């Protein structure tokens, strides 16, 4: 039996955007500066690459391999944990990406459900088992994101007996709003599992139920503030934790009036970070400049202390 590398994934994890050129090609040159920005400006040292935020389903297998390798290489010595998402509609493609993740020494892998032919809980477990078996030494996470996949099988049903089917199984990235199902996942999890929450605007409620970490797109540019939220929660300061959570809610509520999606979110990251991440790939469309400027202004109105927080990080 393969020995699984035990490197438990907890805390704040940034779901990274994929840098593209203005012509829509993968731009590896931005990954090094991107990692430096996350660590130095946001205090985030764990990343989830090639996921929804990274437009994985709009990328070829070759592009995803190229990106995963560059993220892992540039992360060495700077990032504590790199999760590579390997989910595809094709089981063979998912297995190929899983094997590749092991070869490039990713810290763990994750896979969302296939969503053209939608599986029930038993078939989903079999699919995940086949993916995980391609990289048996890597910790494996199920990525639940029903708003994107349309596969809204209760995760608690998926977890039933899964440790006997997938020995490398180590938890869930739960990007759904059903907090009862989420709570059941937490209450029935094994000691070596991690249940991570993925709906940024509901992080605090998830923490109260037992989330051991969070994976999200806004943590790319709000990581320094969300780290403060999590620290406040840990010390029992719910007033500060709520204050930060409510600000994030206000930001996302405003962004949604402007058609918030991965493309718009990516442009907001560009505005706030100064990184050259390029446009999204079709079928997403670029964010109108007026919208990105309006969101950046909203961000600074809600987080006027942002520059001071980043200065404190630079001094550490």
Image (spheres, rainbow, N blue to C red):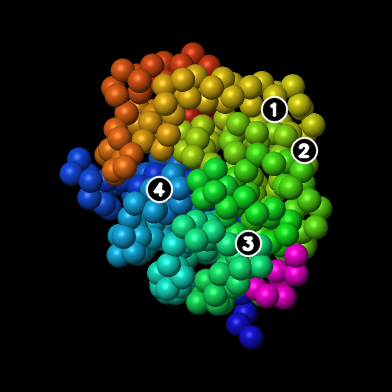
Whichever of labels 2 and 3 marks the residue nearer the N terminus, that label is 3
- From the image, tell me which residue sits under label 4: 54
Whichever of labels 4 and 1 marks the residue nearer the N terminus, that label is 4
Whole-number angstrom distance, CA of label 2 to CA of label 4 = 28 Å
Whichever of labels 3 and 1 marks the residue nearer the N terminus, that label is 3
Magenta stretch: give its range.
160-166
Mark 1: which secondary structure?
A: helix
Residue 208: mark in rendering: 2
- Dot 4 and dot 3 residues touching (CB under 8 Å): no
Whichever of labels 1 and 2 marks the residue nearer the N terminus, that label is 2
Whole-number angstrom distance, CA of label 4 to CA of label 3 = 26 Å
Mark 3: which secondary structure?
A: loop
- Dot 3 and dot 1 residues touching (CB under 8 Å): no
Tell me residue 130's x, y (percent): 54, 75
Which residue is rendered at x = 45% and y = 42% of the image?
Answer: 38
In the picture, the quarter occupied by the N terminus is bottom right
Q: In this image, 219 relative to 1: left or right?
A: left
Q: Nearer the viewer, mark 1 or mark 2?
A: 2
Mark 2: which secondary structure?
A: helix
Residue 120: mark in rendering: 3
Q: Nearer the viewer, mark 2 or mark 3?
A: 3
Residue 241: mark in rendering: 1
Whole-number angstrom distance, CA of label 1 to CA of label 2 = 11 Å
Q: Nearer the viewer, mark 4 or mark 3?
A: 3
Quarter of the figure with residue 275: top left
């Amino acid at each position: 039996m393969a020995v699984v590398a035990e490197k438990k994934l907890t805390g704040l994890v940034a779901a990274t955007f994929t840098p593209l050129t203005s012509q829509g090609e993968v731009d590896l040159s931005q990954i090094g500066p991107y990692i430096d920005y996350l660590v130095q400006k946001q205090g985030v040292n764990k990343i989830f690459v090639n996921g929804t935020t990274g437009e994985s389903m709009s990328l070829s297998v070759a592009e995803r391999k190229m990106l995963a390798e560059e993220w892992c290489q540039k992360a060495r010595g700077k990032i504590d944990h790199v999760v590579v998402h390997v989910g595809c509609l094709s089981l063979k493609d998912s297995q190929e990406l899983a094997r590749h993740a092991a070869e490039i020494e990713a810290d763990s892998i994750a896979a969302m459900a296939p969503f053209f032919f939608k599986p029930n809980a038993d078939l989903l477990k079999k699919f995940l088992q086949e993916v995980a078996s391609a990289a048996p030494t890597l910790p494996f996470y199920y990525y639940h994101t029903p708003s994107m996949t349309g596969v809204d099988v209760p995760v608690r049903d998926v977890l039933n007996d899964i440790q006997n089917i997938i020995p490398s199984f180590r938890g869930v990235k739960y990007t759904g709003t059903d907090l009862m199902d989420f709570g059941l996942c937490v209450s029935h999890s094994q000691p070596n599992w991690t249940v991570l929450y993925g709906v940024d605007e509901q992080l605090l409620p998830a923490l109260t139920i037992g989330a051991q970490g969070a994976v999200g797109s806004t943590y790319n540019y709000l990581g320094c503030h969300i780290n403060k939220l999590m620290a406040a929660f840990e010390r029992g300061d719910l007033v500060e934790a709520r204050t930060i959570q409510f600000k994030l809610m206000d930001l996302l509520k405003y962004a949604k009036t402007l058609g918030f999606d991965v493309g718009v979110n990516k442009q907001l990251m560009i505005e706030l970070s100064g990184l050259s991440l390029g446009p999204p790939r079709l079928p997403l469309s670029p964010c109108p400049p007026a919208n990105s400027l309006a969101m950046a202004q909203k961000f600074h109105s809600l987080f006027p202390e942002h520059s001071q927080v980043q200065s404190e990080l630079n001094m550490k």
